[in-house]
Image (tube, rainbow, N blue to C red):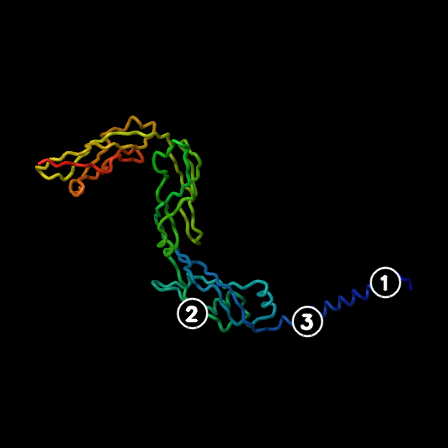
């Protein structure tokens, strides 16, 4: 017998041995896993068909264990893929009553969800009480977050304006109760010297079942060059007793403020009112405190040059 022929014979015997080994293992596998076993199985719970405008509240049961009698093949499949028990919530709704499932209800659901030829016992939940939360909508104030610097001599004429100052948010009632305001993502500019506009995203909270009427909002920032202006304003006296004559020293107050170059010639003394209340005078040192009671809407950073006004009383 040649060496080549001997190798072929040896190789053929090895293949035959492996074949019989495979057949033996296969027969053992079928025999072993076709038998019924009883073991504890853990399944995930999925809640389906919830009532309109409701969501699952926190802390609902999401797992259940039970003793299962079934073939080894079933247990093998559950080993690779955890079973899921779907509970149709609508089937257990009762008017003005919480959703509740008894132990028998759970056994029926588990049995129907898995296979008809299995036996389910010892379910870990005696009674399942489902907590639902209502979806509500609420108007929430929108607050601007900004990080802006201006070129020297330039300022924003007014506060940043948004398309809307509120946003409608929908979500579980318990979540909505705690929501007091919503912020924008930061509006960022460096050395700004002209009017700008754009859109900025809302800083959305990462909570399930919460939705926003808008995820971004339009804004504008009106920017102009500013300069300083000084005016002299006469002082008015309030609550002066009848028959009392006083002399103010001085009887005018100089004010300095920032105003845009565009509006420089549109601001006048009549746009301001400064008054001293005689009732609030300092009797020991004979002075009054000037208070700015009216101002122009076109100015910023008003500074009164006189903090005290002395006075003389004439009898």
Quadrant for residue 167, please give it. top left
Q: CA distance from mark 1 to mark 2?
A: 70 Å
x and y percent of residue 16 in the render? 78, 66
Left or right: 115 in relation to 184: right
Could you tell which of marks 1 and 2 lies nearer the N-terminus? 1
Q: Seen from this angle, which residue lies furthest top?
A: 265
Give me the residue at 23% from left, 33% from top: 253
Q: Which residue is mark 3?
A: 28
* Secondary structure at numbered mark 1: helix
Tag shown at residue 7? 1
Expressed as whole percent of the image width and height from the top left, the position of residue 116 reads: 53, 68
Q: Quadrant of the C terminus?
A: top left
Q: Is residue 63 above or below residue 192?
A: below
Viewport quadrant of the N terminus: bottom right
Point 39% across, 38% down: residue: 219
Residue 260 is tagged as none
Whether tag 1 and tag 2 are in contact, CB under 8 A, the answer is no
The answer to which of marks 2 and 3 sits earlier in the sequence is 3
Q: Nearer the viewer, residue 36 or 204?
A: 204
Question: Which SS class for mark 2?
Answer: strand
- The local secondary structure at tag 3 comes to helix
Local crowd size for mark 2, using a 10 Å CA cut-off: few (<14), some (14–19), many (≥20)? some
Q: At which x and y percent is residue 136?
A: 36, 53
């Amino acid at each position: 017998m040649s060496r080549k022929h001997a190798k072929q014979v040896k190789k053929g015997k090895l293949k035959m041995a492996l074949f019989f080994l495979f057949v033996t293992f296969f027969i053992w596998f079928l025999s072993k896993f076709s038998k019924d076993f009883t073991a504890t199985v853990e399944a995930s719970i999925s809640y389906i068909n919830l009532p309109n405008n409701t969501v699952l509240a926190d802390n609902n049961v999401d797992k259940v264990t039970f003793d299962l009698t079934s073939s080894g093949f079933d247990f093998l499949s559950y080993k690779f893929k955890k079973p899921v028990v779907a509970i149709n919530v609508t089937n257990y709704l009762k008017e003005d009553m919480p959703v509740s499932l008894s132990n028998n209800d759970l056994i029926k659901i588990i049995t129907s969800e898995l296979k008809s030829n299995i036996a389910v016992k010892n379910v870990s939940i005696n009674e399942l009480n489902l907590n639902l939360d209502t979806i509500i909508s609420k108007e929430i104030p929108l607050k601007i977050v900004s990080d802006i610097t201006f070129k020297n001599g330039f300022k924003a004429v007014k506060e940043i304006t948004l398309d809307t100052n509120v946003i409608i948010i929908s979500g579980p009632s318990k979540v909505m109760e705690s929501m007091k305001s919503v912020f924008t993502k930061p509006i960022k500019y460096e050395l700004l010297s002209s009017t700008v506009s754009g859109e900025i995203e809302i800083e959305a909270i990462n909570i399930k079942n919460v939705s926003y009427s808008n995820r971004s909002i339009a804004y504008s920032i009106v920017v102009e060059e500013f300069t300083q202006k000084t005016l002299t304003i006469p002082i008015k006296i309030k609550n002066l007793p009848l028959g009392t004559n006083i002399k103010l020293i001085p009887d005018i107050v100089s004010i300095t403020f920032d105003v845009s170059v565009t509006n420089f010639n549109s601001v006048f003394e009549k746009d301001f009112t400064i008054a001293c209340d005689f009732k609030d005078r300092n009797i020991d040192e004979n002075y009054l405190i000037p208070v700015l009671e009216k101002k122009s809407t076109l100015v910023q950073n008003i500074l009164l040059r006189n903090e005290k006004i002395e006075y003389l009383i004439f009898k």
